[in-house]
Amino acid sequence: KQEVTQIPAALSVPEGENLVLNCSFTDSAIYNLQWFRQDPGKGLTSLLLIQSSQREQTSGRLNASLDKSSGRSTLYIAASQPGDSATYLCAVKNGANSKLTFGKGITLSVRP
Amino acid sequence: KAGVTQTPRYLIKTRGQQVTLSCSPISGHRSVSWYQQTPGQGLQFLFEYFSETQRNKGNFPGRFSGRQFSNSRSEMNVSTLELGDSALYLCASSLSPGNTIYFGEGSWLTVV
């Protein structure tokens, strides 16, 4: 059974800092991994999708990496801004037709 | 183009009643999945539909059911509501299973 862990549960950083959010999963035979952002009271916004054959994906100030052998993914946020404050969730799919398994998320607060 | 649309956004029901939630996927998307989000359990998978067929089902009691129509719109139904069913119900769509999924804003259900 796939389990996804995100530690710490909460993180507070000053504006401008570069930061890394971690995601670990127990079953390395994944199909893809997706990072999402959730603002309070809102749905999830897809940030980056990494297929199992890829090592990383980039979008603007965001870079996500995937290391299947160690069961880890990281989301790198460059030059953080207060607008980046949100909960970041990673989710893993073990097969094209399987469900997404989510971590509990990391609540990020970027202080002005 | 329009995103995933969920209705109603907020509703309050009494224990024992039933509720139907609706989801309109992004135009062209044929895969629809449903998730329940609570503070304690996080995001839990309910079911996934593709081309009107249920492809996957999560570990929820039979009171939770769903369906998908020929136009890819989906509904989920919860019968005999319990207090523990109070949650944010999120719908997501993708072109097909395995592609990037996009979430709606969710339906907030409160059971009193």
Image (cartoon, coloured by chain):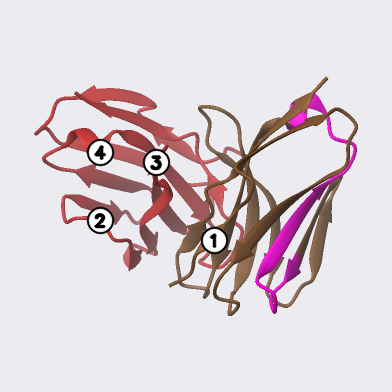
Q: Mark 1 points at which residue?
A: A4
| Residue B11, image x, y percentages | 29, 24
Q: In this view, does B81 lie to the left or right of B74?
A: left
Q: Looking at the rendering, which quadrant does residue A60 occupy?
A: top right
Crowd band around label 2 with a 10 angstrom C-alpha radius: few (<14), some (14–19), many (20+): few
Residue B34 position (above or below residue A108): below
Chain assigned red: B
Name the kind of residue labelled 4 in the image: Asp
**In the rendering, what colour is chain A?**
brown
Asked which secondary structure carries label 4, the reply is helix
Look at 22% across and 53% down and name the residue there. B65
Q: Looking at the rendering, which quadrant does residue B77 occupy?
A: top left
Residues in magenta? Answer: A66-84
Which chain is indicated by disc 2? B
Crowd band around label 3 with a 10 angstrom C-alpha radius: few (<14), some (14–19), many (20+): few
Q: Name the residue under label 3.
A: B40
Q: Is residue B71 left or right of residue A58?
A: left
Query: Label 2 vs label 4: CA separation?
Result: 11 Å
Q: Please tell me if label 2 and label 1 are on a single chain.
A: no
Residue A104 position (above or below residue A93): above
| Residue B9, image x, y percentages | 39, 27
| Residue A75, image x, y percentages | 75, 52
Nearest the eye: B48 or A109: A109
Which chain is indicated by disc 3? B
Query: Label 3 vs label 2: CA separation?
Result: 16 Å
Q: Does the magenta stretch include residue A71?
A: yes
Q: Can residue B72 be seen in this view?
A: no
Residue A45 position (above or below residue B63): above
Q: Looking at the rendering, which quadrant does residue A90 occupy?
A: bottom right
